[in-house]
Image (spheres, rainbow, N blue to C red):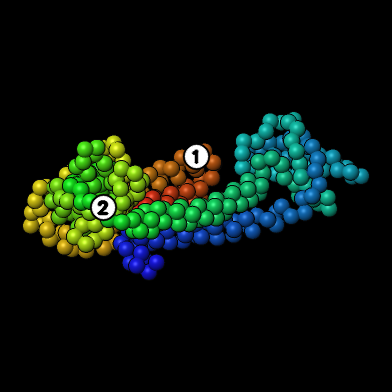
Amino acid sequence: MRNFLRLRPVRHILVTSAVVFVACAAVFVVQLLEFNSTRPRLQGLTANATGIVARVDDDTVTVRFPVPNQPEANAAVELDTTPPPLGAKVPVRYDPSAPSRAVTTGASALVTADRASTYATVTVVAVLAMLAVNGFLLFKRFVQPSRRKAGASVPMRRIKVQRGLLTRSWLEADTATPRWIPVYFSPTLIGLPSPSRVEVLGDLRTDRHVAVRIDGEVLYPAGSVRTAEPRGRRLDNPSEPDEERTLAAATPVRLARQFRADLPVLAVAPVVGAFWALVDGSGFAGWLTVSVLIAAFGFWWAALRGSDPSL
C-alpha cells in the first residue's frame, strides 16, 4: 500500500479528494449553523390547524385560524415563496401557548431549515460516495492491474485527446484489432516515440483495465480499454522526440502544474451554481454553496479521469 501512495496519480486523486472533503465539511458546518439559528423559531409549534389568508403584504401573510377554547388567532408569517391569494385556506402549525407564533407552507423558517438540512445531508452522502468510488477505482485501476503478469510487447502510439474541458493521454495499440488505453499522465509519455514497443501487464483482448511498462516505469490505466477511437481533438507524438520533448520527459511535473491545467474544469461551477440558485430560489448563498461543491468535485473528477497537464 505504501508503494501505491508514492504513485503520482494516486497522490493526485488523494489531494483532490481532500479538497472535496474540506469543501463538503465547510458547507456542512455552515448549513448546521444555519439550521441551529432557525431551530428556535420552530420549537414549540406542535399544534395544527387550517387557516385562512386574511392579509397579504409583500412577502408576509397574515393567517387567521381557530384555536381550541380560545378566540380565533392571527399570525403574521414571513414567506420564502409566492404568497397565496387572499381567502385561500392554508395549513398552519402554531404554538398552543402563544398562537401568534405560527408558520404555514413556504414560511421562511421552514424553507431555511429544510434547505440547510438537505444541503448538510447531501455533503455527507457526497463524501461517502466519493470514498466508495475512490476505493473501487483504486483497486480496479492500480491494485488489480499490478498483479497481472507481463505479456508480449505491443507497438503503441501515445496520443493526446482533448474533449470538452479535459485533455487525456491514450496509448493506441497497433494491433490487428486496435485498442485504446487511457493512462494516467507521466512525463515519460512526452518523449515516447511513435510507435514504441510497450510491455502490457495483462491481456488487451480480455482485461478491461491493463497497465503498461515503459522503460521500467509502470503506467496505470485511467479507464477501461476501448475498441473505438476516443472522440475529441487528437494530437500524436512525433516519430522521434526533439530536444524540447526529451528535456520535458526528464523533468518531473509537479501537482501545482497539474492543478493549473485542471482549472478549465472549474468554468462550469459558477454556471451550475447560478442555475441552481435560480431554480431553488436560494440566492447568493445557494450559488456560492453549489459553486464551491461543483468546483471541488470538478478537480476530483479531472484527477480520476487522468487529466494531462503537458503542453
Q: Which of marks 1 and 2 is in front?
A: 2
Instruction: Give the residue pinned by disc 1.
Output: 278
Residue positioned 48% across, 57% down in the render: 131
Q: Earlier in the sequence, mark 1 or mark 2?
A: 2
Q: Check disc 2 and give the amino acid type.
A: Gly
Residue 79: x and y in percent read: 64, 42
Q: Is residue 239 left or right of residue 72?
A: left
Residue 12: x and y in percent read: 34, 60
Element at badge 1? helix
* Quarter holding residue 65: top right
Residue positioned 65% across, 55% down in the render: 38
Residue positioned 38% across, 58% down in the render: 143
Neighbor class of circle 2 (other Cα within 10 Å; few <14, some 14-19, many 20+) is some
Q: How many labels does the image show?
A: 2
Residue positioned 61% across, 52% down in the render: 117
Q: In this view, does 4 lie to the left or right of 254?
A: right
Neighbor class of circle 1 (other Cα within 10 Å; few <14, some 14-19, many 20+) is some
Instruction: Name the residue nearer the viewer: 9 or 2.
Output: 2
Q: Check disc 1 and give the amino acid type.
A: Leu
Instruction: Give the residue pinned by disc 2.
Output: 151
